[in-house]
Image (cartoon, rainbow, N blue to C red):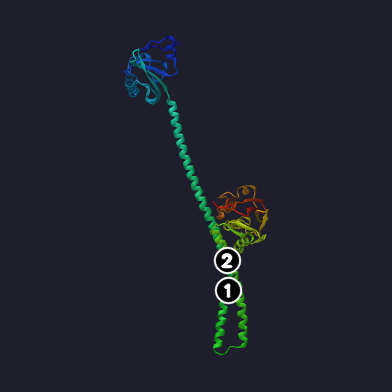
C-alpha cells in the first residue's frame, strides 16, 4: 500500500511526527498568512475533497471556494490579535460537491523563533452527519410536540364535552323526575277541582232555593252531608299534593345546591323515593324501601338524591326490558360506627361479565338505540367516589338481577 504523500511544512518535522501528522484521524493543515496551503494531511483531503499534490501552495479560495470567506475571516482575526480560535463551526461546500457540509475547526498561530506569526495550524473534524441527525431529531421533537399539543387539546375538548353531557344528563334526569311528579300531582289536584266545582254548583242551588223561600230541611241536611264529604276529600287530596310538592321541592333544592348539611338518611331516602314513585305509573315495577331509622349524616343530600335517581332510572330502563315487570328493593343500614350501606337491587335481566366490566365507563350503554347516553352509572360512580367519599360495588349475573352496594361515610369529606 502506497503511504500517504508527505509535504514539508514551514518547520521541518521528524519522520515519526510526520507519520503521525499524515495519519491523524482528523483533518490537519498549515496555512500561510495569505491563506495558502503549506501543508495538508490525508484526512483533510478526504474531508474537503482536495488533493495534496494539486493544492499545496495554492490559496483556499482557489481550492475550496465554498469555504474561503469563513477561512479568510478567521485567519485575519488571528493575524490581528495573535489569539487562537477554537471550536468554530464552519459551513460550506466541498470542492467536489454542491451540498452544504459542516466542520468544527481549531486554529492556532504558528510562530518562528522571533515570535512572528508565519502560519496558521488548522485542525478540522466533519460534523455534517451529526448536524443532520440533530436536525432530524429536532424536527422529530417538534412534530412530537405538535402531536402532543393536538392530543392534549383533543383530550381537553373530550373532557369538556363529557362534562357538558354529564350536566345535560343530570338535567334530563331531573326533567324526567319533574314530569313524573307533575303527572302524579295532577291526580289529586284534578280530583279536587272536580269536587270543588260540584260543591260550587250545590251552593248555587241552595242559595237559589233559600232566596225563593223554597229551602227544605231535608235539602239542607243533604247539602251539609255532601259539603262535609267534599271538604274531607278536598283536604285529603290537597294534603297529598302538598306533601308531594314539599318532597319534590326539598329534593330539587338539594339537587340545585350541593351544600353539606346534617340530615336523616332514611327520611331523605323516603323523600327522594316519593318523588320517583310517579315514574312507576306506566311501568309494571314495584318499588320497596326499607330504611333503618336514626341514621344521621353530615353529607351532601343533593348528590345522594342524584345517585338514587340515576340508579332507579337505570333499573327501570335496563333491568326490565320488553315490558317485563319486577321488583326494585332499596335498603339503608348502618355499616359499622362511621359508615352506612345502601343496597339497591332488582330482579331484572342482569348483566354478563363484559357489561359488568364496562358498566361504570362513560358513554357505555346497551340501549343507545333507545336514546341512552351511557352516563347514568358513570355519574353514580363519580358522585359516590368523589363527592360523597364512598365506594361502590356491582354484583350481577344474567337473568339473576343486579345488586349495587354503596358504602358512604357518615361525615363526607369537605368539598374542595
Q: Is residue 128 left or right of residue 182?
A: left
Instruction: Determine if residue 348 is in view.
Output: no
Q: Nearer the viewer, residue 174 or 318?
A: 174
Tally of marks: 2
Q: Secondary structure at mark 2?
A: helix
Residue in the picture at 63% in, 81% down: 225
Q: Nearer the viewer, residue 284 or 201?
A: 201
Note whether 78 is above or below 258 in the view shown.
above
Instruction: Determine if residue 196 is in view.
Output: yes
Q: Position of residue 342 (x, y in %)?
A: 65, 55
Q: Residues within 10 Å of mark 1 (few under 14, many from 20)?
A: many
Disc number placed over residue 307 in the picture, else none: none
Q: Quadrant of residue 293?
A: bottom right
Q: Quadrant of residue 327?
A: bottom right
Residue in the picture at 57% in, 78% down: 198
- Assess whether mark 2 and mark 1 are in contact (beta carbons under 8 angstroms): no
Q: Residues within 10 Å of mark 2 (few under 14, many from 20)?
A: some
Q: Position of residue 261 (x, y in %)?
A: 58, 58
Q: Nearer the viewer, residue 388 or 239?
A: 388
Residue in the picture at 67% in, 57% down: 333
Q: Which residue is mark 2?
A: 246
Disc number placed over residue 192 in the picture, else none: 1
Q: Position of residue 49 (x, y in %)?
A: 39, 19
Amino acid at each position: 500500500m502506497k503511504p500517504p504523500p508527505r509535504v514539508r511544512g514551514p518547520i521541518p518535522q521528524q519522520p515519526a511526527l510526520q507519520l503521525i501528522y499524515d495519519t491523524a484521524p482528523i483533518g490537519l493543515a498549515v496555512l500561510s498568512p495569505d491563506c495558502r496551503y503549506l501543508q495538508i494531511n490525508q484526512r483533510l483531503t478526504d474531508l474537503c475533497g482536495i488533493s495534496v499534490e494539486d493544492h499545496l501552495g495554492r490559496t483556499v479560495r482557489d481550492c475550496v471556494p465554498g469555504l474561503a470567506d469563513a477561512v479568510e475571516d478567521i485567519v485575519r482575526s488571528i493575524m490581528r490579535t495573535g489569539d487562537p480560535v477554537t471550536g468554530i463551526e464552519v459551513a460550506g461546500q466541498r470542492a467536489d460537491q454542491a451540498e452544504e457540509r459542516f466542520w468544527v475547526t481549531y486554529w492556532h498561530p504558528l510562530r518562528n523563533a522571533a515570535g512572528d506569526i508565519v502560519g496558521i495550524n488548522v485542525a478540522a473534524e466533519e460534523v455534517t452527519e451529526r448536524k443532520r441527525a440533530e436536525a432530524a431529531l429536532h424536527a422529530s421533537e417538534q412534530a412530537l410536540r405538535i402531536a402532543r399539543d393536538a392530543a392534549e387539546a383533543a383530550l381537553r375538548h373530550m373532557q369538556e364535552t363529557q362534562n357538558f353531557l354529564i350536566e345535560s344528563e343530570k338535567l334530563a334526569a331531573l326533567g324526567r323526575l319533574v314530569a313524573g311528579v307533575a303527572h302524579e300531582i295532577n291526580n289529586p289536584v284534578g280530583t279536587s277541582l272536580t269536587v270543588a266545582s260540584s260543591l260550587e254548583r250545590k251552593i248555587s242551588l241552595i242559595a237559589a232555593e233559600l232566596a225563593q223561600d223554597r229551602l227544605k230541611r231535608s235539602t239542607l241536611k243533604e247539602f251539609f252531608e255532601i259539603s262535609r264529604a267534599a271538604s274531607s276529600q278536598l283536604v285529603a287530596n290537597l294534603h297529598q299534593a302538598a306533601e308531594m310538592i314539599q318532597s319534590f321541592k326539598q329534593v330539587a333544592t338539594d339537587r340545585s345546591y350541593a351544600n353539606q348539611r346534617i340530615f336523616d338518611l332514611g327520611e331523605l331516602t323516603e323523600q327522594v323515593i316519593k318523588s320517583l314513585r310517579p315514574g312507576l305509573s306506566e311501568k309494571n315495577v314495584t318499588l320497596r324501601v326499607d330504611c333503618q331509622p336514626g341514621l344521621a349524616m353530615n353529607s351532601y343530600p343533593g348528590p345522594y338524591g342524584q345517585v338514587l335517581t340515576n340508579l332507579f332510572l337505570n333499573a327501570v330502563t335496563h333491568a326490565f326490558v320488553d315490558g317485563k315487570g319486577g321488583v326494585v328493593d332499596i335498603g339503608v343500614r348502618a355499616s359499622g360506627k362511621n359508615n352506612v350501606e345502601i343496597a339497591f337491587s332488582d330482579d331484572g335481566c342482569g348483566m354478563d361479565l363484559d357489561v359488568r366490566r364496562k358498566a361504570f365507563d362513560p358513554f357505555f350503554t346497551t340501549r343507545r338505540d333507545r336514546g341512552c347516553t351511557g352516563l347514568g352509572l358513570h355519574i353514580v360512580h363519580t358522585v359516590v367516589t368523589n363527592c360523597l367519599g364512598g365506594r361502590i360495588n356491582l354484583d350481577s349475573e344474567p337473568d339473576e338481577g343486579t345488586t349495587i352496594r354503596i358504602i358512604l361515610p357518615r361525615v363526607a369529606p369537605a368539598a374542595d
